[in-house]
Amino acid sequence: MRFENKKAFFNYEILEKLEAGIILKGSEVKSLREGKGRIKEAFARIEEGECFIYNFYITPYPASLEKPAPMRKKKLLLGRAEIKRLNRKLEEKGLTLIPLAAYFNKNGLLKIEIALAKGKKLYDKREKIKERDVRRDIERRMKQG
């Protein structure tokens, strides 16, 4: 099961991608394995030398006695040096950390792909839409012959 943040590529210019582990409760993992999660509104932040993900919605597992809050902040597992490096970049350039995807790797562990990104301006988004429309139009005409 893979959860993707497709809007991230439209709203942000992706500069660098990283893979991080995440700390979850058992019932959250079960729920994610069933495909009941949403990463669209999520973002990451570095606080006191640790990285956390916010707004990663995980539907509570129905058969569980312990039901953690679906929108609670979850800790990401990154190395200390990597967190320091990211923090320096975030402070100096006005960048942000956003999750691109959440997936289970071949060992069955949930991984979060986060990216160091810069927000696009409205005119950049419009330019991207124009390019896509022109490309589609050309392909349509090529097919018609």
Image (tube, rainbow, N blue to C red):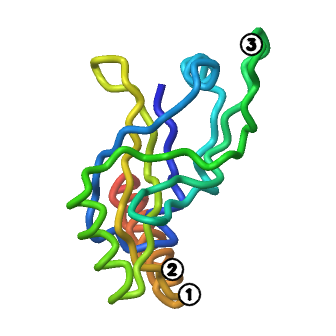
Type of amino acid under label 1: Leu
Residue located beneath label 3 in the image: 64
Q: Amino acid at mark 3?
A: Ser
Q: Are marks 2 and 3 in contact (CB under 8 Å)?
A: no
**Few, some or many residues within 10 Å of mark 2 (<14, 14–19, 20+):** some
Under circle 2, the secondary element is helix
Query: Looking at the image, is mark 3 or mark 1 nearer the viewer?
Result: 3
Q: Which residue is mark 2?
A: 125
Left-right relation of 24 to 41: left
Q: Regarding mark 1 in the picture, which secondary structure is present there? A: helix
Task: Residue at 63%, 41% (x, y): give it.
Answer: 38
Mark 1 lies on residue: 122
- Mark 2 vs mark 3, foreground winner is 3
Among all residues in the image, which is located at the extreme front? 48
Spot the residue most to the top.
Answer: 63
Mark 1 neighbour density, 10 Å: few (under 14) some (14–19) many (20 or more): few
Task: First in sequence, mark 2 or 3: give its number.
Answer: 3
- Distance CA(mark 1)–CA(mark 2): 5 Å
